[in-house]
Each structure stands twice: as structure tokens, then as C-alpha cells.
Image (cartoon, rainbow, N blue to C red):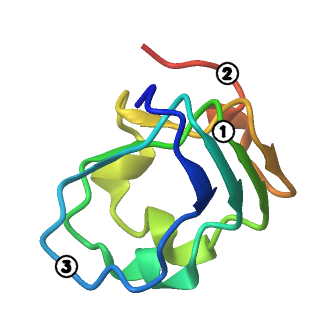
Amino acid sequence: GNNLLTGTLPSNISYQYFKVLSVHNNLLTGEIPISYSNLSRLEELRLNNNKLSGTIPDNIFNNNDLLFSSKCDLTNNYFDNCPFSFSITRS
């Protein structure tokens, strides 16, 4: 995080063994690509404090470890369907 990255999240991530995706505190725009639903081993997802928008893919939380993790933060973006549990900052 904190790199002043701009643009959109890449949709061609095909590494199903990705464990951490942390690009918080940047200037990223656009939606979370549906392909991120295939990151079945994701344990940490930090996309907070960007300018992301649109709909969060339903299947991105198929991994219950991520869903209930304290390492998932989607706050301070412009999502249409951000679940309540992700509308507050989690430590």
C-alpha cells in the first residue's frame, strides 16, 4: 500500500495460490474483476482507501477464512454492495 498507484486492478491474475493481495491506500479505480473469485487460497485482501466502485463479486468470499478474517478490508471505496461487516475498519 501507500504507493500512489493509479488505474484499475488487473483482471488477468491467474495465480490461484495467491495468499495476499494488498494494494490499500492508493488511487485505484474501477471494479474488482470477477476473476478474483478464483483466488481460492486468498488469506488477506486489503483494498481499502482507494476509489474502487461497482459491485463486489459474490464469489470472492467463497473462502470463509477470508470472509471472517481480520485481514480483509474494503472500506473507504465506492462499492454498491459492500457487506456491513466490511463497512467498518477491522484491525
What kind of residue is marked 3?
Tyr
81 w.r.t. 13: above or below: above
Viewer-proximal residue among 68 and 89: 89
Task: Identify the secondary structure beneath mark 1.
Answer: loop
Q: Residue furthest top?
A: 91
- Disc with the residue nearer the chain's start (2 vs 1): 1
- Residues at circles 3 and 2 in contact by the CB criterion of under 8 Å: no
Residue 15's label in the rendered image is 3
Q: Position of residue 26 (x, y in %)?
A: 57, 35
Residue at 74% x, 37% y: name it.
84
Among the 4 quarters of the image, the one containing residue 25: top right
Residue under label 1: 50
Q: Quadrant of the N terminus?
A: top left
Q: Tell me the crowding category of disc 3: few under 14, some 14 to 19, or many 20 or more residues within 10 angstroms, Cα based.
A: few
What kind of residue is marked 1?
Asn
Q: Position of residue 74 (x, y in %)?
A: 60, 40
Q: Position of residue 40 (x, y in %)?
A: 26, 73
Residue under label 2: 88
Residue at 45% x, 25% y: name it.
2
